[in-house]
Image (cartoon, rainbow, N blue to C red):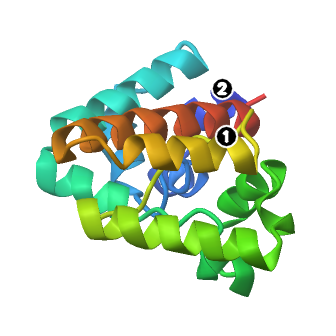
Amino acid sequence: MTLEKLNNSSTEEFIAALGRIFEHSPWVPEAVLQMRPFSSVDRLHGAMVAAVEKAGQVAQLQLIRAHPDLAGKAARQGSLTAESTSEQKGAGLDRLTDNEFEEFHRLNNAYQSRFGFPFILSVRGHDKHSIMAAFRQRLSHNAGEEVAEALRQIALIARFRLHDLIA
């Protein structure tokens, strides 16, 4: 996909192409549709992040909750999006020992219990050890800090996904 093609695509094609950039949230590309044409991938990304920021807390929490647990049951069952599968695989989360999987399960549960949404981390450049360290460190945050951090991580994930999609 090129930026020119995306800028000139129909509404349906635009939303279909970008609907998975922000996990299961096609409302994000819908919100920036009328801003076309975008002069760069970074401008498109910035517009999409701004749309999330303006969407309000309810929509933001829905976006956060649309993300899967890292190394969770969905990953083991193969029911993640292609993008999430690739990202988790790149961080080695598809090669956990049973003990490591149990530790991720414990951390996911502790985080979910504390904050009411999944732990989100842009895993590119991370491995299982650095992800577990981030989990442990972020469990000490308050809810406001974690909502802000989750949204920051989602923006990073979206940047990577956009650059992967658009040549």
Provide residue 123's location: percent of width, then percent of height.
66, 43
Give the CA distance from mark 1 to mark 2.
38 Å
Quarter of the rendering occupied by the C terminus: top right
- Looking at the rendered structure, which numbered label has been put on residue 83? none
Query: Residue at horizontal 71%, vertical 37%?
Result: 124
Residue identified by numbered label 1: 130
Answer few, some or many: residues within 10 Å of disc 1's Cα (few below 14, many 20 plus, some between 14 and 19): few
The answer to whether residue 97 is visible is yes
Residue 105, image quadrant: bottom right
Give the structural element (helix, strand or loop) at label 1. Answer: helix
Provide residue 40's location: percent of width, then percent of height.
58, 15
- Looking at the rendered structure, which numbered label has been put on residue 4? 2
Identity of the residue furthest to the top in this view: 39
Q: Nearer the viewer, residue 81 or 94?
A: 94
Mark 2 is on which residue type?
Glu
Query: Residue at horizontal 83%, vertical 72%?
Result: 97
The answer to whether residue 116 is visible is no
Q: Is residue 36 left or right of residue 158?
A: left
Answer few, some or many: residues within 10 Å of disc 2's Cα (few below 14, many 20 plus, some between 14 and 19): some
